[in-house]
Amino acid sequence: MNLALIFARNTGSFVIPNNQPCPGTVLGLGPNQIQLARTFDSGAGVGSFNATIPAAACGGFFQLLQISTCETSNVSQAPN
């Protein structure tokens, strides 16, 4: 599974623009300062992803996007 980890400082409703993968997909992230944090391949089935986040991301929000199907995960908040 090809996944994208997306970060924003707040929650909201951001629609992926037409010039990006999964155009029209609605994310539960706010549009201000939204950014792609990382892409990775999780392999088949269920997996886990562990990472150290920079201090600036503490308290921010993350969401996963499965690039091949455009499915999204729930929004999660990074710890402070």
Image (cartoon, grey):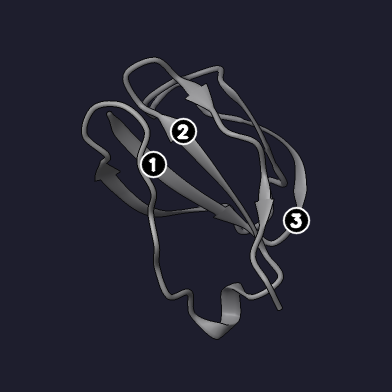
Whole-Å distance between the Cαs marked 1 and 2?
Answer: 5 Å
Given the image, on which type of amino acid does mark 1 rest?
Answer: Ala
Residue at screen point 31% across, 27% down? 45
| View extreme (bottom): residue | 55
Task: Tell me if label 1 and label 2 are in contact, CB under 8 Å.
Answer: yes
Give left or right: position of 80 versus 52. Answer: right
Q: Quadrant of residue 52?
A: bottom left
Answer with mark 3 or mark 1, whichever residue precedes in sequence: 1
Residue at screen point 39% across, 62% down? 50
Give left or right: position of 20 versus 25. Answer: left
Q: Nearer the viewer, residue 19 or 41?
A: 41
Vertical side of 65 occupied by 34: above or below: below
Q: Within 10 Å of the Cα at label 3, are there few (<14), some (14-19), or many (20+) other Cα atoms?
A: some
Given the image, on which type of amino acid does mark 2 rest?
Answer: Leu
Answer with mark 1 or mark 2, whichever residue precedes in sequence: 1
Q: Position of residue 72 (x, y in %)?
A: 54, 28
Give left or right: position of 39 versus 59. Answer: left
Answer with mark 3 or mark 2, whichever residue precedes in sequence: 3
Q: Quadrant of residue 7?
A: bottom right
Q: Position of residue 9 (x, y in %)?
A: 69, 62
Which residue position is annotated with label 3? 10
Which residue position is annotated with label 1? 4
Which residue position is annotated with label 2? 65
Q: Secondary structure at mark 2?
A: strand
Whole-Å distance between the Cαs marked 3 and 2?
Answer: 17 Å
Q: Within 10 Å of the Cα at label 1, are there few (<14), some (14-19), or many (20+) other Cα atoms?
A: some
